[in-house]
Amino acid sequence: MENLIYAPKNGFDRLNETDRAELESYCRRYMDFMDAAKTERESVTETIRIAEQHGFREFQAGMALQPGDRVYANNRGKSIIFAVIGREPLSRGCHITAAHADSPRLDIKPNPLCEDSELAFLKTHYYGGIKKYQWTTIPLALHGVITTQDGAVHTVTIGEDESDPIFCVTDLLIHLAADQMKKTLADGVTGENLRVLMGTQPIEGEGSDRVKKNILSLLHEKYGIVEEDLLSAELTMVPAGKCREVGLDRSMISAYGHDDRVCVYAEFEPLLDLETPAYTAVCVLADKEEIGSVGVSGMQSQFFENFMADLCDIQDVKLRHCLAASTCLSADVSNAYDPLYAETCDKQNNSRLNYGISLCKYTGSRGKGGASDASSELFNKIRTIFNRAGVLWQIAELGKVDQGGGGTVAAYMANRNIDTLDAGVPVLSMHAPMELVSKLDAYMTMKAMRAFYLAK
Ligand SMILES: [Zn+2]
C-alpha cells in the first residue's frame, strides 16, 4: 500500500510548476515588506498602506457591510485586524488567522541618555527573550516615535539608509576577557551593559557632559525635542540592514524578526486579492506576543472582542455564537531542526527547513504547561484543507520533552472558545538578531493561509 508509511519527501521534490513560478516573486514581496516594517508600529503602517491600495477602508461601528467588503480596525497604531466579509452569516463563524508583529529587541529606557568617560550612551531594557551576547558588536538602527507636548508624533528611523549612521553595543576585547570567558553565556554580557554607543564628540564650550549635550543638540536640530521628550518616547534599537538571500543556492532568507512577520505577511497578502470567501476572513496582527500577549495591544486585549462584536452587531448575530463557530490558525513560527544542536530536539517530531508550513498540535513546556492543545478533529480539518489545496505541511514540536518550550497567541484565541491550531514557518536561529527561513516554507505558509481563507 502506497501511503502506509508517513515518509514525506523534501519540499523541492514536490513543488509543482505554479509553485516554482510564484515562490521567488512572493519572497521578493515579503523581503520588501520586511525592509519597510521592522517593528509592530511599522507593520501596521505598511499593511494599511498596501491594504488601502486593495480596497480596504477603516471600519466604523454600524457601517453597512456586504459580502466582499474589506475593512480594517487599527488598534492605536500597534496592532490591527483586517476582515473580508464572507457570504455566510457570522453566526456560521469566521476563518481567523492571528500572527504577531513584535520581535525581541533592545528598547530604550525612559531616561536613557548618559555620558561616561566622554562617551555618550543610550541605556536599554531588552524586550522579549534574547541571548544578550548576540546583541553586541552588530549594526543597530533606532526606530520608534517621540511625541511632543504640542501633540506632534515624530517618527524616528536612523540607521537603515545607506547614508545614515548606525549604532552599536561594544564588547570586551578577547585580550582582556579572561574573566568574562569563564562566565556562562547568560552572564557574560549583562542587561545593563547593553548600552548603545551614541557619540563621542563634545559640544563646543565649557562644562560637564559635553558629549551628551552634543547628542541632545543634534536630536533637537532633527526633531525639535528636548531631553524630557525622551522620557515619554517609545524608541527601540533593532538590527540595522535589509533582508538578504542566503546560501549559494539562494534558498533561504535572512532577516531580523522573521518571528513572526514571516507569518504576518503570509496571512496578510492573500487577503489583498481574495474574492468573496464563504466565511468571513479575519486577519489579526497582534503586538506584545514576545512578553505574554498582555496589555492594550496584545492578543489578550478586549480590542479583538470589541471589533468582532461590532461586526456581529451589523448582522444582528451574537458574538459568542460567532466565536464558537469560528476556526483560528495561530500563525507563529516553529524551530527548524538544526543538526548542530541535535541533542535538544526529537527529530521525528521537529519541523525542518523545506518541508512546508509546520502544524503544531500543542505548544507549552515540559508537561505541556501553558499549552493550547488542538483537537484531532480540528487538526484533521486543517490538514484536509491543505492536502486538497496542494499545500506542503509538516508537524512541529518545540524541542525535547524536558528541554524547555514556549507559547504563542493560540491559548488566548482558544480561551475565547475558538477552535485554534498553531501553524507557521520553521525558523533557524529563532530570536537571534539574524534569523533564517527557507523561501519554500515562507511561500507554503502564504499558500496555506490562502487555502484556509478560501475553504468552504
Ligand atoms: Zn513568535
Image: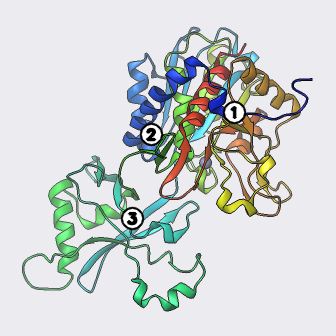
Residue at mark 1: 329
Q: Image check: 322 left or right of 84? A: right
**Label 3, residues with CA under 10 Å away: few <14, some 14-19, many ≥20:** some
Examine the rendering and report whether any part of residue 132 can be seen: yes
Distance, label 1 to label 3, CA atoms, is 35 Å
**Label 1, residues with CA under 10 Å away: few <14, some 14-19, many ≥20:** many
Q: Image check: 168 left or right of 5? A: left
Please state which amino acid type lies under the numbered disc 3: Ile
Residue at mark 3: 138
Q: Residue at x 82, y 60 (%)?
A: 366
Q: Is residue 315 above or below residue 1?
A: above
Q: Give how far across and how far down residue 199 sits, in percent.
A: 23, 72
Residue at mark 2: 43
Q: Earlier in the sequence, mark 1 or mark 3?
A: 3
Please state which amino acid type lies under the numbered disc 1: Leu
Distance, label 1 to label 2, CA atoms, is 20 Å
**Label 2, residues with CA under 10 Å away: few <14, some 14-19, many ≥20:** many
Q: Earlier in the sequence, mark 3 or mark 2?
A: 2
Query: Of helix, strand and loop, which one carries label 3?
Result: loop
Distance, label 3 to label 2, CA atoms, is 23 Å
